[in-house]
Image: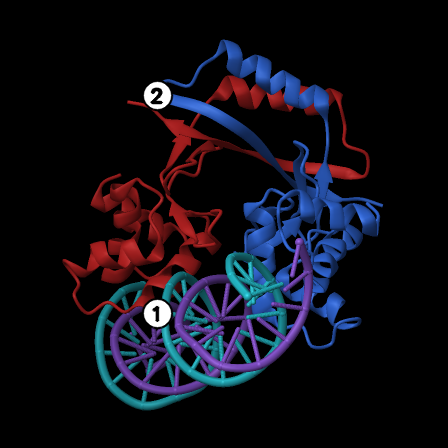
Chain colours: A blue, B red, C purple, D cyan
Amino acid sequence: MKDIDIRTRLAEKSLKVTPQRTAILEAIVKLNNHPTAESIGDHIRELHPNISMATVYKVLDTLVENGLIRKVKTESGIMRYDAEMESHHHLYCSDSDRIEDYKNDELIEMLENYFAKKRIPGFEIDDIKLQIIGKFIK
Amino acid sequence: MKDIDIRTRLAEKSLKVTPQRTAILEAIVKLNNHPTAESIGDHIRELHPNISMATVYKVLDTLVENGLIRKVKTESGIMRYDAEMESHHHLYCSDSDRIEDYKNDELIEMLENYFAKKRIPGFEIDDIKLQIIGKFIK
DNA sequence: ATTATTGCAAAGACTTTGCAACTCC
DNA sequence: GGAGTTGCAAAGTCTTTGCAATAAT
């Protein structure tokens, strides 16, 4: 995602294109590691030394509300953010705080087929997320 | 799980059987609703008016460490607790903070079979958790 | 008797809010 | 120009920590 795309994506949502917003969205895309608010702030502060964490949080909320990024929940309760908006799952390292995206259309399809046949009584499914916990091996 | 069982389960882990611990473990089992630390505290305070939240948190940590309960992560970042230790998944209500257990051995087996065949390169799976998001219908 | 646990108060981590100054459209 | 956004400081929420008093084995 290029700089121009980032500005476009903000504008498409009728969001004012500010340096803080472009920097934050760009950071999440570039870091590509499900960063925390804190690490986004640290990264941005190299170019925008004056950005405040309040702004980071406000912008993150705005981006989530507008469907430009997603929150990723963690065991520790610290929120992390992800610019990948397509349906995908997550690999969680059981030894560290590493989280990687895991895309697998076949798996998504298998689950959709399964739940199309086997309904859950009293429940209407919107989305399914897999948390795959394990170890990254070299 | 009866009172005697709760005391036994604590003792089996070489944990001292205190009124606070039995009350907290009993509350999680009885509430059966993935309570937060706060709602556990509120529930217990009816019988133990003096229990402190610090104790609630310490006991919850101890119970998690000893495998007697589990933490359930939520979108909001507030931790919730679950006394169900068998492998199971969760139904998350997209309109409220309701979370229900979802047990389905067939589904677990299907996923195990799938990942037995289809490995994830560079990753060794320990556990898989499904978060099924949707709406409870009456 | 020994060791672990409790409760209090205080601190900590992460996040949100109020508001005046400032920016973008 | 006007509505929306930023940054600061302060407050809020949830959770953890230190430590003396207390309770369990």
Task: Kindly indicate whether the residues beneath marks 2 and 1 are on one polypeptide chain.
Answer: no
On-image quarter of the N terminus of chain B: top left
Where residue D20 sits: x, y (%)? 31, 90
Q: Give the CA distance from mark 2 to mark 1.
A: 38 Å
Residue B117, compared with residue B3, is above or below; it is: above
The residue shown at (67%, 53%) is A95
* Crowding at mark 1 (Cα within 10 Å: few <14, some 14-19, many 20+): few
Where residue B119 sits: x, y (%)? 76, 28
Tag 1 subunit: B
Q: What residue is pinned by disc 2?
A: A122
On-image quarter of the C terminus of chain B: top left
The residue shown at (55%, 29%) is A128
Tag 2 subunit: A
Q: Quadrant of residue C23?
A: bottom right
The local secondary structure at tag 1 comes to helix
Of the residues shown, which amino acid type is indicated by label 1?
A: Ala
Where residue B20 sits: x, y (%)? 26, 61
Indicate which label's residue lies in the foreground, 2 or 1: 2
Residue B126 in view (yes/no): yes
Where residue B89 sits: x, y (%)? 48, 32
Of the residues shown, which amino acid type is indicated by label 2?
A: Gly
Q: Which mark is residue B54?
A: 1
